[in-house]
Amino acid sequence: MGKLLDALASLAGALLEKFSAVIETVLNVLDELPKLFGGFLDFLGILFPFLPSEITLLLTFGVVAVVFAAIIKAIRS
């Protein structure tokens, strides 16, 4: 049972690392976009009404995954 839990924790860690990399890349791109709109809040005000609910859900899941990964790393350290 312990080996199974370790394997699952390893798999979750690997998946969360990949999600973190993707989210970091997306955030870097999004960091550059507000310069076109005059500020981050202006950018969000323009962008979010046009995002489909699926994309908003995906972004929310990404944030939760990064937070979960940070919690797991903090616990294992």
Image: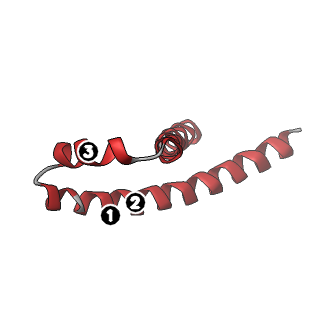
- What amino acid is labelled 3 in the image? Leu
* Gap between marks 3 and 2 measured at Cα: 14 Å
At x 24% / y 47%, what residue is drawn? 46
- Position in image of residue 11 (x %, y %): 71, 53
**Does residue 23 appear to the left or right of 27 in the view shown?**
right
**Does residue 62 appear to the left or right of 12 in the view shown?**
left
Instruction: State the quadrant of the N terminus.
Output: top right
- What amino acid is labelled 2 in the image? Val
Residue at the spot of label 1: 29
Contact? badges 1 and 2 (CB < 8 Å): yes
Q: Which colour scheme is used?
A: secondary structure
Residue at the spot of label 2: 26
At x 17% / y 45%, what residue is drawn? 42
At x 49% / y 41%, what residue is drawn? 53
- Position in image of residue 20 (x %, y %): 49, 55
Any mark on residue 21, and which? Answer: none
- What amino acid is labelled 1 in the image? Val
Residue at the spot of label 3: 44
Q: In which quarter of the image is residue 34?
A: bottom left
Which element carries disc 2, helix, strand or loop? helix
Nearer the camera: disc 3 or disc 2: 3
Q: Residue furthest right?
A: 1
